[in-house]
Amino acid sequence: MKHIAGVVIVSMGSALLAGAMIGDTKEQPAAPSSVFSRFSGTAKVNATSLRVEIKDWQLVRTPQGIRIPVTGFHLVQLTSGKVDTEIAGRREHRKAGDFWTVAAGETMIVHFPPHSQAAKIKTIAINR
């Protein structure tokens, strides 16, 4: 029951945020609804230090899409929902369970296909 109440509160807040954003005439991608950092630290691989971050993202449909801030190389998994991703100008449809990568320096924008309202993704970012 607590999970349902949380989903309702997040959905209502997202709807209010989306309504406020519709009034804005700029068509720029929105920020994610919520981000949970699962791990952030340094790993040593053959005497090379790498910064690793693991995050869970909860996304709610917006008219202009959602820009996922990408720093470094990303491995991404869609854990629930259906989305269309735009990476380096190329758009691809994704379904729950799909994995893909985002190269360092590229941007990723998540769009929702018709009848899709929310999704969850997990990212693993690796930086030098």
Image: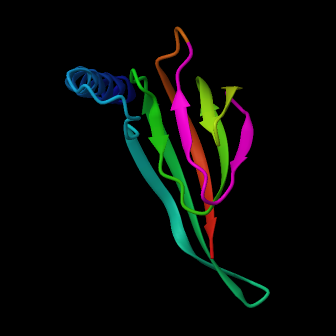
- Give the answer, above or below, for where 44 lies relative to 24: below
In the picture as drawn, the residue positioned furthest to the right comes out as 46
Task: Point out the stretch of residues depicted in magenta.
Answer: 95-113
In the picture as drawn, the residue positioned furthest to the bottom comes out as 47
Q: Is residue 78 left or right of residue 16?
A: right
Residue 44 or residue 24, whichever sits in front: 24
Q: In the rendering, at what x and y percent does residue 86 appear?
A: 61, 34
Q: Decide if residue 10 is in sight here.
A: yes
Q: Is residue 100 inside the magenta stretch? A: yes
For the N terminus, give its image quadrant: top left
- Give the answer, above or below, for where 93 lies relative to 54: above
Quadrant hosting residue 60: top left
- Give the answer, above or below, for where 123 lies relative to 6: below
Q: In the rendering, at what x and y percent does residue 51 appear?
A: 59, 74
- At x 41%, y 35%, the residue is 29
Q: Is residue 96 inside the magenta stretch? A: yes
Q: Total marks drawn?
A: 0
For the C terminus, give its image quadrant: bottom right
- At x 48%, y 51%, the residue is 69
- Give the answer, above or below, for where 104 lies relative to 63: below
Quadrant hosting residue 114: top right
